Amino acid sequence: DPVLRDLATAKGKYYGTALPAGRLTGTHGSVAAAQFGSVTAENEMKWGSVEPTRGSFSWTGADQIMSFAAANGQKVRGHTLVWHSQLPNWLANGTFGNDELRTIMTDHVTTQTARYKGRIDQWDVVNEALNEDGTLRASKFYTQLGESYIADAFRAARAADPAAKLYINDYNTDATGAKSNGLYSLVQRLQAQGVPIDGVGFQTHLIIGQVPATFQANLQRFADLGLDVAITELDIRMTLPATTERLAQQKADFKAVTNACLAVARCKGITVWGFSDAVSWVPDVFPGQGAATPYNENYQPKPAYYGIAEALGWT
Ligand code: G3I
């Protein structure tokens, strides 16, 4: 079988996957190591995972992902520092003054980026900051601190790990439209303020047959701001069962997404949000849908896998 990480490297990109710390051994671990040149902890680097009790840290899962990546010569995308979801209960349910909340946030960013200083290729500093209409989401951080929480998070990350590329990451921003326009404006405001932002992550959770026609142009307009871009959480779900026809459509879609990144010089690479249908968030969240990844539940490559490889030049 073709090796996606090597094919991507030959094109000047990386091909990565999300990985849960509980799946680093067995078939899942060996395919992850062999095929992917970058990993993202699926949950283990989120705030709720690393600081379940205030001031008491739990780095085991995150450290396991870091060790796995080092052992296998893989880059790491750090995911994620400031997000409204998967916060620890003490923070989500606690009441804090504005100054205190700002310090809690910047201390968290500093602690986590410093721990892995020099070993993270890209950090998702701020995740899912936008509403569908392009306005800023009323997270605890935005509601209490205003838009400046974003600038403060990036500044704290840069100070603690100057080598990491700092990203803002979101979903449903793959096409041009209200949400992606809101992101574009936000990024321009951050740049105008001298905020140290390096890149924009496009999660790219898609449905078969619906790769946006504007996808490549949208990546390019962000790159034209002088930023890197990356596809950070790619999956392409379908209504089950996975018929031959649906799998063929999915192959075309994975190929199209991969080609879009290849066509944009500043697109650094692609991460799939899980590589096997055996381990995917999709069926839990979208009942009746699934089969969203390039390998089936038995770790056999699907047509989508060959679509990726073909886009990367494999014949
Ligand atoms: O760890 C517990 C386990 O002990 C328990 O038995 C089980 C029962 O439901 O839940 C387990 O926790 C789950 C965790 O994943 C680990 O499997 C949580 O309930 C579940 O909510 C959590 O879902 C994660 C989700 O983020 C949370 O928002 C998914 O794995 C993860 O793939 C998903 O990833 C997000 C990105 O971070 C951001 N973009 C969207 C993407 C998909 O939702």
Image (spheres, rainbow, N blue to C red):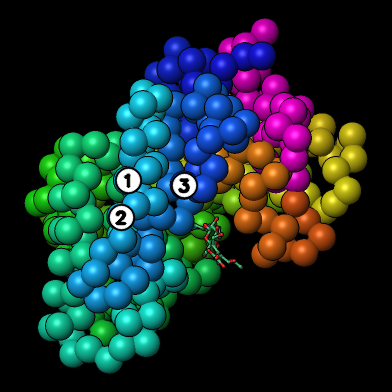
**Where is 242 relative to 188, above or below?**
above
Count residues near mark 3 (Cα–Cα under 10 Å), then give few for <14, some for 14-19, many for 20+: many
Q: Is residue 194 in view?
A: yes
Check residue 63 in the rendering and tell me which mark sits there, or answer none.
1
Q: Give residue 283's position: percent from left, percent from top.
A: 72, 58
Q: Amino acid at mark 1?
A: Asp
Q: Quadrant of the N terminus?
A: top right
Q: Is residue 295 magenta?
A: yes
Label 3 belongs to which residue?
21
Residue 142: name its quadrant.
bottom left
Magenta segment range? 291-315
Q: Is residue 263 in view?
A: no
Q: Calculate the distance from the C-alpha at mark 3 to the C-alpha at mark 1.
A: 9 Å
Q: Amino acid at mark 2?
A: Trp
Local secondary structure at mark 3: helix
Between 224 and 207, the one nearer to me in the picture = 207
Q: Position of 170 compared to 55: left or right? A: right
Q: Is mark 2 within 8 Å of ligand 1?
A: no
Q: Name which of mark 2 and mark 3 comes first in the sequence.
A: 3
Q: Calculate the distance from the C-alpha at mark 1 to the C-alpha at mark 2.
A: 6 Å
User: Residue at (13%, 42%) from the top-left corner?
Assistant: 162
Residue most toward the left? Answer: 159
> Could you tell me what secondary structure mostly forms the magenta stretch?
loop
Q: Amino acid at mark 3?
A: Ala
Q: Give residue 61's position: percent from left, percent from top.
A: 39, 51
Q: Is residue 224 magenta?
A: no
Is mark 1 in CB contact (under 8 Å) with mark 2?
yes
Local secondary structure at mark 1: helix
Q: Quadrant of the C terminus?
A: top right
Label 2 belongs to which residue?
59
